[in-house]
Image (cartoon, helix red, strand yellow):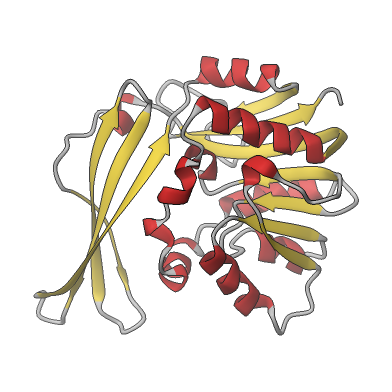
Amino acid sequence: MNQFNNFEEYKDPALYDRENDPFQDDVEFLKKWAAKVNGPMIDLACGTGRATIPLAEAGHSLIGVDIHHGMLSQANKKTEHANLNIEWIEQDCTNLQLGVKSPLIFIVGNSFQHFLTNEEQDQLLTSVHNHLEVEGIFIFGTRFPSLDELLQPPTEEYWRSYKDETGKTVDVYTISNYDTLQQVQHYITIRRQKDDSGKTVGEQKTNIKLRYVYPQEMDRLLKQNRFEILGVYKDWDESPITKDSQQMIYVCRKVSE
């Protein structure tokens, strides 16, 4: 699978947490749906548990699944002394063998984009369908294939800055190159650590590939895999999707066995 060769961005799970833990918009959305169901929910591509842990802290039962051993190890470390109802499982999301049916499965953090081919997307959706109860809900988000997103110049672009664990400033830059035939964006992420004087004292580069899916294509993909689309939004506040959206948030229901 292509996803096995697409892990550079996740080689430092602690860094991943520092950069991504503050984002909780999707968690608040998921809590509303979690309140409507009973039984274990499944967080696919759960990573270090950014969404899994707060849902468990809210009293829900969860199974967190990821293919990346290091990310799951970090998730285990974060919860080893907490009395939370979470089972961490290392499996390939395109070939789930969990032995349970769930009323709610979700995959957030734009992880849907890691499934780079039509075959992998179908395998993922088949796995989800097989593990959902009848009428079960599937929620996921992915980046919207806007012109601004896809047609970025293949030059270094400033993205964001943050403080690392030592208190030093880290400036993050990206270089992107979109493959129109494969609908895959190739990203290089550059993190430059600066000292108090602003001098660069360290640099790290990672590569990642992300698949983009167009709205009409997604509609066909989900229907072919026996899902009914209940809602499509441009953000986790359930705003209607528009042509200038940055995200596509899908709420789907399993329609048959």
In depth, the one of 134 and 119 nearer the eye is 119
Q: Where is residue 1 in the image (x, y as percent from the top left)?
A: 50, 41
Q: Where is residue 112 in the image (x, y as percent from the top left)?
A: 54, 39
Name the image quarter holding residue 139: top right
Relative horizontal placement of residue 111, taking residue 228 as reference (left or right): left
For residue 250, say whether it is visible: yes
Q: Decide: is 139 above or below 173.
A: above
In depth, the one of 234 and 9 nearer the eye is 9
Q: Residue at x 71, y 31 (%)?
A: 126
Q: Residue at x 52, y 25 (%)?
A: 118
Total number of numbered discs in the rendering: 0
Name the image quarter holding residue 225: top right
Q: Which residue is drawn at 33% across and 20% down?
A: 181
In depth, the one of 104 and 34 nearer the eye is 104
Q: Decide: is 235 above or below 19.
A: above
Relative horizontal placement of residue 234, taking residue 131 as reference (left or right): left
Q: Residue at x 25, y 28 (%)?
A: 151
Q: Where is residue 59 in the image (x, y as percent from the top left)?
A: 82, 65
Name the image quarter holding residue 106: top right
For residue 31, say whether it is visible: no
Relative horizontal placement of residue 240, taking residue 256 as reference (left or right): left
Identify the image quadrant of the C terminus.
Answer: top right
Relative horizontal placement of residue 116, taking residue 184 as reference (left or right): right
Residue that protrudes farthest toward the front in the picture: 1
